[in-house]
Amino acid sequence: MRDIVMQPETRTRYPGPITEAKKHSHRLVEKGFATDEALAQVLDRYPTELFDINLYDYDDEGQVSLRTGARGKLSGDKLLEAIQAGRLWVNLRNAEKGCPELWAASMAEFANIQAAYPGMRAVTNAGQLIISSPVAKVPYHFDAAGVVLFHLRGRKRIFVYPGDERHLPERNMEQVVARQTTEELPYVRAFETDAQVVDLEPGEALTWPLYAPHRVDNLDKFCVSLSMDFQTWGSRFRNGALYTNAVIRSRGGRPRFTDGMSEPELAARWAASLALKRVGGLKSKLSDFQRDFEPEIGVADGAGALRG
């Protein structure tokens, strides 16, 4: 583990029991969830509509472009082979439904981790199983939830950045929460001097502060992780306030940043967000991605032509 140390209070402007990136142990690996055989079976039975297959490219300044793929018709073992030989990042959404045995075991591990943070009480949990190629990378982004990343196979390097306005502009957060854009954030290479850098091995889990921007590099090995999102009432209130602010801003208003709001004000904006969503306050712009490849064995990056 390699850390660039900053004082915990400087790493985020959003309150919460998790103040810096920290590793925890878990026992999921020994249960056999990440073997080739187990993964092939999961890929065979997983609902096609819950696959996100991404291919990221980066320029010299670290700016990212994204291609999105379709599931295709490969069998589970062949799809796994294409991922292992390519440069793909595959997210299997709704892991709580798609792989219930793994999910049940991970919830037991989550309970142990939650107990390490006094005052942390998740009210909802959801997740995705991440199966990714050697040397694949995920760009600089944030999650609108708390996260525990359970690592099962391979080696990852996670870069966690401060959650201040420079690294995490609230206007961008509003756009993500309101589903006007994907989770990626504006990135400059100068941010690297501020990163807390953690290498993650199988059997380790990582937590980081709520909303903290981060990016992920696989370290030359095929990787498998379970990313578990969780919401507390505090994060629910803030997400609702961010959504309400996005609607206000879209209509020419200039809302105050949420980090200057009291808890009752955040709760009131959350309640407003529920009403705004019912009447279609902002229509999602993420409902339909153009998919331009499907996994294939023996082609560059594991990304072959769509076959329809």
Image: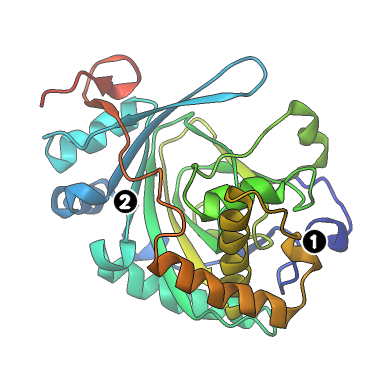
Identity of the residue drawn at 62% across and 67% down: 241
Q: Secondary structure at mark 1?
A: loop
Pointer 1 residue: 13
Q: Is residue 72 left or right of residue 154?
A: left
Identity of the residue drawn at 70% across and 83% down: 264
Q: Is residue 195 left or right of residue 91?
A: right
Pointer 2 residue: 92
Query: Residue 197 occupies which quadrant of the picture?
Result: top right
Q: Residue furthest front?
A: 252
Return the x and y of residue 140 as percentages of the image width and height: 61, 38
Return the x and y of residue 256 as percentages of the image width and height: 76, 60
Q: Secondary structure at mark 2?
A: strand
Return the x and y of residue 190 as percentages of the image width and height: 80, 29
Identified by mark 1, the residue type is: Arg
Tell me if residue 20 comes above or below residue 117 in the rendering: above
- Which disc is residue 258 wearing? none
Q: Which quarter of the figure is the C terminus placed in?
A: top left
Q: How is the image coloured?
A: rainbow
Identity of the residue drawn at 77% across and 34% down: 192
Identified by mark 2, the residue type is: Leu
Q: Mark 1 or 2 closer to N-term?
A: 1
Query: Residue 280 occupies which quadrant of the picture?
Result: bottom left
Tell me if residue 145 comes above or below residue 294 in the rendering: below
Front in this rendered view, residue 34 or 197: 197
Q: Is residue 158 left or right of residue 72?
A: right
Identity of the residue drawn at 54% across and 78% down: 271
Tell me if residue 96 comes above or below residue 66 in the rendering: below
Q: Is residue 217 left or right of residue 96?
A: right
Return the x and y of residue 294 as percentages of the image width and height: 23, 28
